[in-house]
Image (tube, rainbow, N blue to C red):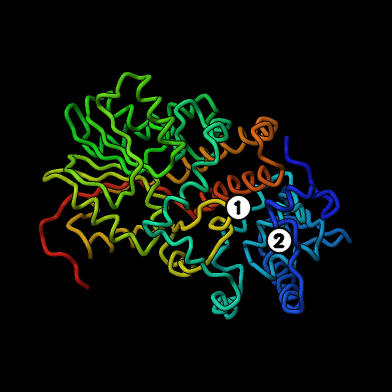
């Protein structure tokens, strides 16, 4: 079941309001009033260009005129919605959903058309004001060696039981790779675990992992890659900054009988030493931060043995959008992944050429597979709402996570986001100093 719609603010429990102050409070003041008027106009202007039916309490309708069935976005509290968006942009848009200022029975259907036109929704002359009116990323969330552990803990240490409510038995929290996926197909839940194993096996193949391979994994997750590499006869060292993940991954490794082949350390990637025949990392680069991409790849280059390979899976975005949004503090930063930054393929190729002897030699895109992975997670999460509440998470949290999963799915369905498996090989030529 879905979390209930709030009749803000009367039914916002005091303890929940204390946990979510920026959701419980609607921004106020003369500056907000001015900006909310502009936000209301801009949203109406933008919504007329997307295939979504926007409904207001007074009966007004907005959205691209379409003869087909459109997803419905219901604005229940227009003033609160406009104030939030006016004060904080897309952060306010997400908080408005968390508060129930707007609702829908098709969240992905609403978000996907907006994501598809993300770069064109705001008139170009107003885009130059982005840095002046929107929040910047706080220094406390920069991914220094000091801050990174707390950034990781805010997401991955929420509760292993929480993640188990919507992940499959492999406890793999990244894109699966489905067999025979074609446009319009919807893999069933029963295919997800095999899709996750297929994704991992492909990455291990790309890195050349076999009997006796010395493997470094950066970002343990809950241990499935360790298990599958060890089953091939590899010796694995995996590092993570999540206490919860380390504990469960170690237990899974022990239960599988691979404790003699797998070591899982609570360690920052910058502190890794040793030499490895293969370095693998699944959707961890997104948590590094652009400032530290050179350090990340320099570390990989430093520990990679002669003849070794690096294989990573990375969520990417178009380079122009990465450049335009690199300093923007987003709803995802505030509530889901503090300190994160999605790279572009161009950026990853450039940083390795400038700072390492590694060269990008193979690219495999699989964004449509991530959209289906996220759909399955979202449907599972929503369907197990009561189980999530029993774990101690309130209704604001469940609405936040539903929005996060749908927001991510919409990004991949629209093509705004992609995910790639990438292989880096070592080039002993001159580094690019341009």
Residue 72 is at least partly visible in this image? no
The 10 Å Cα crowd at callout 2, few under 14, some 14 to 19, many 20 or more, is some
Image quarter of the C terminus:
bottom left
- State the image quarter where residue 280 is shown: top left
What residue is at 76 percent from the left and 57 percent from the top? Answer: 54
Q: Secondary structure at mark 2?
A: loop
* Label 1 CA crowd tier, 10 Å (few <14, some 14–19, many 20+): many
Mark 2–mark 1 Cα distance, whole angstroms, equals 14 Å
Helix, strand or loop at disc 1? helix
CB contact under 8 Å: marks 2 and 1: no
Between disc 2 and disc 1, whose residue precedes? 2
Q: Position of residue 307 (x, y in %)?
A: 12, 44
* Residue, far right: 58
User: Would residue 25 be found to the left or right of residue 212 on screen?
Assistant: right
| Residue 396, horizontal then vertical, whole percent | 70, 47
Q: Residue 14: which numbered mark, if any? A: none
Quick check: can you spot residue 202? yes
- Residue placed under numbered mark 1 in the picture: 112
The number of callouts visible is 2
Q: Name the residue located 22 percent from the left edge and 33 percent from the top edge.
A: 209
């Amino acid at each position: 079941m879905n979390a209930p719609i709030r009749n803000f603010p009367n039914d916002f429990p005091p303890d929940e309001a204390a946990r979510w102050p920026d959701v419980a409070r609607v921004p106020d003041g003369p500056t907000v009033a001015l900006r909310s008027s502009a936000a209301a106009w801009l949203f109406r202007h933008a919504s007329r260009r997307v295939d979504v039916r926007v409904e207001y309490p007074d009966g007004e309708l907005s959205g691209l005129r379409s003869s087909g069935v459109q997803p419905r976005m219901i604005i229940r509290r227009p003033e609160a919605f406009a104030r939030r968006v006016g004060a904080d942009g897309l952060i306010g848009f997400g908080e408005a959903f968390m508060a129930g200022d707007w609702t829908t029975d098709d969240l992905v259907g609403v978000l996907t058309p907006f994501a598809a036109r993300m770069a064109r929704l705001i008139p170009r002359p107003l885009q130059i004001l982005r840095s002046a009116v929107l929040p910047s990323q706080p220094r406390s969330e920069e991914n220094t060696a000091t801050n990174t552990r707390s950034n990781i803990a805010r997401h991955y240490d929420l509760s292993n039981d929480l993640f188990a409510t919507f992940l499959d038995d492999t406890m793999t929290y990244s894109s699966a790779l489905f067999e025979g996926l074609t446009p319009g197909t919807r893999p069933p839940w029963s295919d997800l675990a095999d899709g996750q194993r297929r994704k991992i096996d492909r990455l291990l193949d790309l890195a050349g992992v076999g009997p006796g391979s010395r493997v470094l994994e950066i970002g343990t997750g809950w241990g499935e890659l360790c298990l599958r590499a060890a089953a091939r006869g590899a010796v694995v060292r995996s590092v993570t900054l999540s206490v919860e993940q380390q504990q469960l991954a170690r237990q899974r490794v022990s239960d599988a009988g691979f404790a003699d082949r797998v070591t899982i350390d609570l360690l920052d990637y910058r502190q890794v030493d040793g030499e490895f025949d293969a370095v693998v990392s699944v959707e961890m680069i997104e948590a590094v931060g652009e400032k530290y991409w050179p350090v990340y790849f320099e570390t990989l280059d430093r520990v990679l043995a002669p003849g070794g390979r690096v294989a990573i899976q990375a969520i990417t975005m178009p380079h122009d959008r990465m450049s335009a949004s690199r300093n923007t503090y987003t709803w995802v930063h505030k509530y889901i992944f503090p300190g994160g930054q999605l790279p572009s393929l161009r950026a990853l190729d450039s940083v390795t050429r400038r700072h390492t002897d590694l060269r990008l030699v193979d690219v495999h895109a699989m964004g449509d597979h991530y959209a289906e992975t996220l759909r399955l997670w979202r449907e599972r999460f929503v369907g197990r709402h009561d189980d999530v509440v029993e774990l101690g998470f309130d209704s604001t949290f469940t609405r936040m996570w539903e929005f996060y999963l749908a927001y991510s799915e919409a990004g991949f369905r629209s093509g705004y986001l992609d995910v790639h498996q990438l292989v880096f090989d070592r080039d002993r030529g001159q580094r690019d100093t341009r």
